[in-house]
Amino acid sequence: MVSSAGNRAAPIGIFDSGLGGLTVAHAIMRQLPAESLVYFGDTARVPYGPKSPDTVRRYSHEIAAYLLEQGVKAIVVACNTATAHALPMLERELDVPVIGVVEPGARAAVRASRSGRIGVIATAGTIKSGAYVRAIHAEAPDARVTARACPLFVPLVEEGWINHDATWSVAQEYLAPFVHDEVDTLVLGCTHYPLLKPLIGEIIGRDVRLIDSAEETALDTQRMLAEHSLAATSGEGTYRFVASDDQQQFLALGQRFFGDTIERVEIRTFG
Ligand code: DGL
């Protein structure tokens, strides 16, 4: 694999199963304006949530190889499911620093919780992997963690049903165990869930802290670049967006997650 390890001016590679990771990309752009980014969204193969760990690892390996070909100096895995299944493999395989979204989210949750009762919602794959529960217990061994997969949230958000009756009833069903267990902090362990913050907050109670790992991951990225002497030193970053399917869908839906207009999308397909 070609790499730009050690080159401060090289871009950071970020990938997600689709568009949701744009929330992480946006947080990095805001916090680290001098950094250039190459964002890859695997829109042809989304969702990763219901797929097997081996499949998600294979996809992650292909995308990381592609990002290294683009000359990235570090990789941020913005997808919770890919972080849960593939982060240790990528850390072993790659000669550039790699960070995921699970540890930053878990750490922020432990810091926010007063009672030690922490909830986690995520895709089926992320919950089955146990990655969040392990990461929370690594920080706070006595924490009582309630974890539940909420697979219907991803298609509802992609449909734009952020405040739809159907989403309300699905959310009431999914969130009942967290109300019952009186969690005081809930980790939104999936790229799509931050868009449901108002609805989730209303159902679970406004005093429950909702943790979205995007900002925390951006902070970790900053720390990681500094530790490896890789931080860009001057100028303004440039951004590339790459998808594995249909530009139009990326342009139309991307803004929902990104918060800003995306003008150009490149296409790179696999397999
Ligand atoms: N990006 C995924 C995650 O954060 C959600 C969408 C999917 O299932 O691929 O887990």
Image (tube, helix red, strand yellow):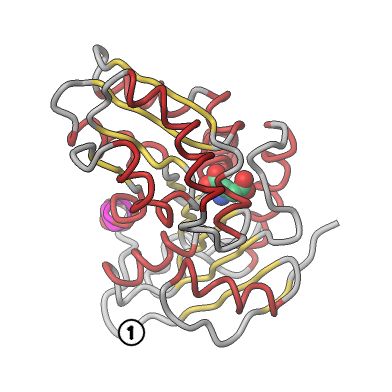
Q: Residue at x 31, y 21 (%)?
A: 138
Assign the C terminus to one quadrant of the image. Answer: bottom right
Q: Main secondary structure of the magenta part?
A: helix
Q: Residue at x 53, y 38 (%)?
A: 87
Q: Is mark 1 within 8 Å of ligand 1?
A: no
Asked if the magenta segment contains residue 111, the reply would be no
For the residue pair 99 and 247, the one nearer the viewer reads as 247
Q: Where is residue 216 in the image (x, y as percent from the top left)?
A: 29, 50
Q: In this view, does 129 lie to the left or right of 193?
A: right
Residue 9 vs 111, above or below: the answer is below
Q: Magenta span covers which residues?
A: 219-225
What amino acid type should be assigned to the residue bearing mark 1?
Glu
Q: From this viewpoint, which residue is outermost toward the front? A: 165
The residue furthest top is 142
Circle 1 sits in a helix, a strand or a loop, which is it? loop
* Residue 184 percent location from the top left of the image: 22, 29
Q: Name the residue under label 1.
A: 236
Quadrant location of residue 93? Answer: top right
Residue at the far right in the pictured view: 271
Q: Residue at x 47, y 39 (%)?
A: 171
Residue 109 appears in which quarter of the rendering? top left
Mark 1 neighbour class, 10 Å CA radius: few under 14, some 14 to 19, many 20 or more: few
Quarter of the figure that contains the N terminus: bottom right
Query: Would residue 202 appear left or right of 251 to someone viewing this image?
Result: left
The residue that appears at 58% across and 24% down in the rendered structure is 128
223 inside magenta stretch: yes
Q: Nearer the viewer, residue 159 or 110?
A: 159
Q: Position of residue 140 (x, y in %)?
A: 24, 20
Q: Please tell me in which quadrant of the rendered image residue 233 appears.
A: bottom left
